Image (tube, rainbow, N blue to C red):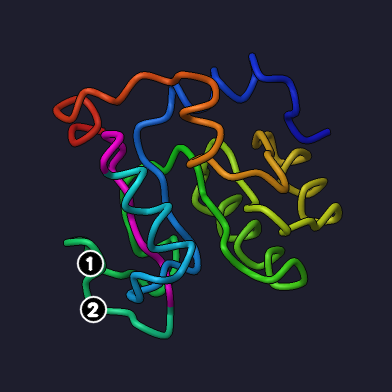
Amino acid sequence: MPLTRDEDIAELLTNARTIAVVGASDRPGRPSYGVMKFLQDHGYRVFPVNPQITGEHVLGEFVWRELAQIGVPIDIVDIFRRPEAAGEAVDQAIFVGAKAVWMQLGVINHEAAERAEAAGLKVVMDRCPAIDIPRLRIPPRDREVAAAG
Protein backbone atom coordinates (compact mmCIF):
# COMPACT_ATOMS: atom_id res chain seq x y z
CA MET A 1 0.00 0.00 0.00
CA PRO A 2 1.29 3.46 -0.82
CA LEU A 3 2.19 5.63 2.15
CA THR A 4 -0.70 7.80 3.30
CA ARG A 5 -0.01 8.47 6.98
CA ASP A 6 1.55 11.87 7.65
CA GLU A 7 4.12 10.26 9.96
CA ASP A 8 5.35 7.90 7.22
CA ILE A 9 5.54 10.63 4.57
CA ALA A 10 7.31 12.98 6.98
CA GLU A 11 9.86 10.26 7.80
CA LEU A 12 10.52 9.62 4.10
CA LEU A 13 11.01 13.32 3.35
CA THR A 14 13.10 13.94 6.46
CA ASN A 15 15.50 11.08 5.72
CA ALA A 16 15.86 11.78 2.00
CA ARG A 17 18.88 13.63 0.65
CA THR A 18 18.72 13.01 -3.10
CA ILE A 19 15.69 13.24 -5.37
CA ALA A 20 15.56 12.47 -9.08
CA VAL A 21 12.78 14.30 -10.92
CA VAL A 22 11.66 12.17 -13.87
CA GLY A 23 9.93 14.37 -16.41
CA ALA A 24 11.76 17.51 -15.30
CA SER A 25 11.13 20.48 -17.55
CA ASP A 26 13.31 23.41 -18.58
CA ARG A 27 10.20 25.61 -18.83
CA PRO A 28 9.60 27.73 -15.69
CA GLY A 29 5.81 27.55 -16.09
CA ARG A 30 5.73 23.76 -15.80
CA PRO A 31 4.89 22.12 -12.44
CA SER A 32 7.99 19.89 -12.56
CA TYR A 33 10.23 22.96 -12.84
CA GLY A 34 8.57 24.63 -9.86
CA VAL A 35 8.72 21.50 -7.71
CA MET A 36 12.36 20.93 -8.63
CA LYS A 37 13.20 24.51 -7.63
CA PHE A 38 11.25 24.10 -4.38
CA LEU A 39 13.15 20.90 -3.55
CA GLN A 40 16.51 22.53 -4.33
CA ASP A 41 15.62 25.55 -2.21
CA HIS A 42 14.71 23.15 0.62
CA GLY A 43 18.22 21.71 0.48
CA TYR A 44 17.73 18.45 -1.40
CA ARG A 45 20.17 17.41 -4.13
CA VAL A 46 17.94 17.15 -7.18
CA PHE A 47 18.74 15.37 -10.45
CA PRO A 48 16.52 16.19 -13.45
CA VAL A 49 15.77 13.27 -15.79
CA ASN A 50 14.25 13.87 -19.21
CA PRO A 51 15.36 12.15 -22.43
CA GLN A 52 13.98 15.04 -24.52
CA ILE A 53 16.46 17.56 -23.06
CA THR A 54 19.35 15.28 -22.05
CA GLY A 55 22.64 17.14 -21.73
CA GLU A 56 21.04 20.51 -21.09
CA HIS A 57 20.84 22.11 -17.65
CA VAL A 58 17.79 22.84 -15.54
CA LEU A 59 18.24 25.04 -12.48
CA GLY A 60 21.99 24.49 -12.70
CA GLU A 61 21.77 20.69 -12.85
CA PHE A 62 22.76 18.47 -15.79
CA VAL A 63 19.74 16.71 -17.28
CA TRP A 64 20.09 12.93 -17.45
CA ARG A 65 18.48 10.62 -20.02
CA GLU A 66 17.70 7.91 -17.45
CA LEU A 67 18.19 7.16 -13.78
CA ALA A 68 20.96 4.60 -14.38
CA GLN A 69 23.24 7.36 -15.71
CA ILE A 70 23.24 9.39 -12.50
CA GLY A 71 25.65 7.12 -10.66
CA VAL A 72 24.85 8.16 -7.08
CA PRO A 73 22.29 6.66 -4.68
CA ILE A 74 18.81 8.10 -5.15
CA ASP A 75 16.50 8.32 -2.16
CA ILE A 76 13.30 9.35 -3.95
CA VAL A 77 12.33 9.21 -7.62
CA ASP A 78 9.70 11.93 -8.12
CA ILE A 79 7.65 11.05 -11.22
CA PHE A 80 6.08 13.70 -13.46
CA ARG A 81 4.76 11.39 -16.18
CA ARG A 82 1.34 10.34 -17.38
CA PRO A 83 0.00 7.47 -15.25
CA GLU A 84 0.43 4.94 -18.06
CA ALA A 85 4.08 6.03 -18.52
CA ALA A 86 4.92 6.01 -14.80
CA GLY A 87 5.65 2.28 -14.84
CA GLU A 88 8.83 2.77 -16.86
CA ALA A 89 10.15 5.29 -14.32
CA VAL A 90 9.23 2.91 -11.49
CA ASP A 91 11.11 0.08 -13.21
CA GLN A 92 14.17 2.33 -13.57
CA ALA A 93 13.89 3.27 -9.88
CA ILE A 94 13.84 -0.41 -8.94
CA PHE A 95 16.82 -1.10 -11.21
CA VAL A 96 19.00 1.64 -9.65
CA GLY A 97 18.03 0.71 -6.09
CA ALA A 98 16.14 3.88 -5.19
CA LYS A 99 14.57 3.86 -1.75
CA ALA A 100 11.20 5.28 -2.81
CA VAL A 101 9.07 6.38 -5.74
CA TRP A 102 6.81 9.40 -5.48
CA MET A 103 4.09 9.71 -8.11
CA GLN A 104 2.91 13.28 -8.46
CA LEU A 105 -0.64 14.60 -8.22
CA GLY A 106 -2.80 12.82 -10.77
CA VAL A 107 -0.21 10.09 -11.36
CA ILE A 108 -1.93 6.92 -10.23
CA ASN A 109 -0.58 3.57 -11.41
CA HIS A 110 -1.41 0.74 -9.02
CA GLU A 111 0.46 -1.93 -11.01
CA ALA A 112 3.68 0.12 -10.94
CA ALA A 113 3.19 0.83 -7.23
CA GLU A 114 2.82 -2.89 -6.54
CA ARG A 115 6.05 -3.65 -8.46
CA ALA A 116 7.91 -1.00 -6.48
CA GLU A 117 6.61 -2.28 -3.15
CA ALA A 118 7.42 -5.89 -4.10
CA ALA A 119 11.00 -4.72 -4.78
CA GLY A 120 11.18 -3.09 -1.32
CA LEU A 121 10.65 0.54 -2.31
CA LYS A 122 8.35 2.88 -0.43
CA VAL A 123 5.62 4.37 -2.60
CA VAL A 124 3.77 7.68 -2.45
CA MET A 125 1.06 8.22 -5.04
CA ASP A 126 -1.07 11.18 -6.14
CA ARG A 127 0.72 13.67 -3.88
CA CYS A 128 3.24 16.49 -4.23
CA PRO A 129 6.30 16.99 -2.00
CA ALA A 130 6.08 20.76 -2.53
CA ILE A 131 2.69 20.61 -0.80
CA ASP A 132 3.54 18.00 1.83
CA ILE A 133 6.88 19.49 2.96
CA PRO A 134 5.42 22.79 4.21
CA ARG A 135 2.21 21.12 5.42
CA LEU A 136 4.21 18.64 7.52
CA ARG A 137 6.72 21.33 8.56
CA ILE A 138 9.73 19.38 7.30
CA PRO A 139 12.80 21.49 8.11
CA PRO A 140 15.17 22.43 5.25
CA ARG A 141 18.01 20.01 4.58
CA ASP A 142 21.50 20.99 5.63
CA ARG A 143 23.04 21.78 2.22
CA GLU A 144 26.44 20.26 3.05
CA VAL A 145 24.81 17.01 4.13
CA ALA A 146 22.60 16.93 1.02
CA ALA A 147 25.55 17.60 -1.30
CA ALA A 148 27.61 14.87 0.34
CA GLY A 149 24.81 12.41 -0.32
The answer to whether the residue labelled 2 contacts the one labelled 1, judged by CB atoms less than 8 Å apart, is: no
In the displayed structure, 15 sits above or below 75; it is above
Query: In the figure, residue 81 lies in which quadrant?
Result: bottom right
Q: What residue lies at 68% left-to-right and 64% top-to-bottom?
A: 86
Q: Residue furthest bottom?
A: 52
Q: Position of residue 49 (x, y in %)?
A: 41, 66
Instruction: Tell me the magenta residue range.
Output: 41-50
Of the numbered discs in the image, which one, if any, rests on residue 113? Answer: none
Q: What residue lies at 23% left-to-right and 78% top-to-bottom?
A: 56
Q: Position of residue 7 (x, y in %)?
A: 64, 14
The residue that disc 2 covers is 56
Query: In the figure, residue 2 lies in which quadrant?
Result: top right
Q: What residue lies at 78% left-to-right and 40% top-to-bottom?
A: 118
The amino acid type, in three-letter code, at marker 2 is: Glu
The residue that disc 1 covers is 62
Please, what secondary structure does the residue beneath circle 1 have?
strand
Residue 144 falls inside the magenta stretch: no
Assess disc 2: are there few (<14), some (14-19) or many (≥20) residues with their C-alpha within 10 Å of its C-alpha: some
Please, what secondary structure does the residue beneath circle 2 have?
loop
Query: In the figure, residue 11 lies in which quadrant?
Result: top right
